[in-house]
Amino acid sequence: MRVAIVTESFPPVFNGVANSVVRVLETLKAEGHEAIVIAPTTPGDYFLGFRTHRVPSFPLFQFQLGLPNPFVSKILDEFKPDVVHAASPVLLGGQAIAWADRNQVPAVAIFQTDIAAYAERYGFKLLRPLVDKAMASFHASATINLAPTSEVRDYLGNLGLRNVSVWGRGVDLDLFHPNRKVSAEVFQLRAKYAPSGQKIVGFVGRLAAEKQVDRFSELFSIENTTFVIVGDGPERNNLVESFAGAPVHFAGKRVDEDLANHYASFDAFVHFGTEETFGQTIQEAQAAGVPVLAPCAGGPKFLIESGVSGFLIDPDAPLGFTSVLENLLGNSALSARIAESGRRSVLNKSWKANNEKLLAFYEEALAITRQRTTSELLVA
């Protein structure tokens, strides 16, 4: 197949959308498919051997959103894709989906970023209905829409979208692995962050307001515990100032082996964010054999069986996270059981298995488009 990936996020930007697109490209390369990438940012003219095209963009809620322009249509005309893959479509993705609709090319749209929720959080609550309507219009002409969870599928359905299926995210089961816990690199990290043998409670993610990392202060009363925050973002300076004097280490952005070693150094992983549409770092922590605590809201509800593969906490319960975490850190048998079950819960979610489902959706979209084209010819 010839696949045109039009994405609102791509390296060197580091977020869930960009990471997912990179993994899709790895699968397309391994399977021998052709592809191009159209995005607001690119690391160069080629990525994994695929041609990349950078388009003008503007910042919105700390994201770079691509601007529609004739250049995009020209690229698609010349490439002649069999499928258009629109990753987290907004303006740029919406243009690509419209192009596909006009040219009878199947489009698969991936919903990954709840822009309406961002608008609400950043003080534009009254705009949410308009943003919801706009997002629905961007997705409306897609042959197939893919949501990360059944909850998001229902949300898209309520916006009037049809042909919505669930496609989650994969996880690198080799990179994120419990075996790292006994590696020299992880022993060095533990000696660095917990020189007196403290328990290490970690977080990995973008340091933005919606991640609610500021709530880690609720955990500082737990004795013999240190905290490691991995990631960067607009809230970092505020968090550093707010946590001054607390046993918190800001590790900054980490990738690949270094990121995997940081996960493996944790005794527990805590995510306070209630607005996650999925929660990729939760899967990575589970794969690494780290017990996870997350709010009983949004994506985490579909990744964690509470008390089995992690803990879902009522985000509004006073000190709800603190009591569960304190009990977990003080009970090695419980911690080991949760860690093992968390790892088992993601064993069927490798990127290979996950992206095989995506390729099946491509094929389904092709079949739907062929059927529509045949029907139109018969009617004519």
Image (cartoon, helix red, strand yellow):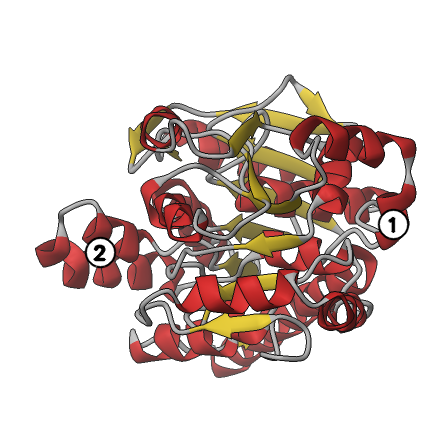
Identity of the residue drawn at 71% across and 40% down = 35
* Lateral position of residue 102 relative to residue 249, left or right: left
* Lateral position of residue 352 relative to residue 370, left or right: right
Identity of the residue drawn at 69% across and 63% down = 358
The correct choice, above or below, for 58 with respect to 20 in the image is above
* Lateral position of residue 271 relative to residue 318, left or right: right
Identity of the residue drawn at 57% across and 72% down = 311
> Of 245 and 248, which appears nearest the observer?
245
Kindly report which numbered mark, 1 or 2, lies closer to the viewer in this rendering: 1
Extreme-left residue of the structure: 126
> Of 96 and 181, which appears nearest the observer?
181
Q: Amino acid at mark 1?
A: Asp
The correct choice, above or below, for 288 with respect to 72 in the image is below
Q: Which mark is residue 174?
A: 1
Q: For numbered disc 2, what is the local secondary structure?
A: helix
**Callout 2: 10 Å neighbours few (<14), some, many (20+)?**
many
Q: Position of residue 71 (x, y in %)?
A: 44, 27
**Callout 1: 10 Å neighbours few (<14), some, many (20+)?**
few
Identity of the residue drawn at 58% across and 68% down = 327
Q: Which mark is residue 131?
A: 2
Work out how far the residue at label 1 is from the one at label 2, CA to CA, in angstroms: 39 Å
Q: Amino acid at mark 2?
A: Val
Q: For numbered disc 1, what is the local secondary structure?
A: loop
One can see residue 127 in this view:
yes
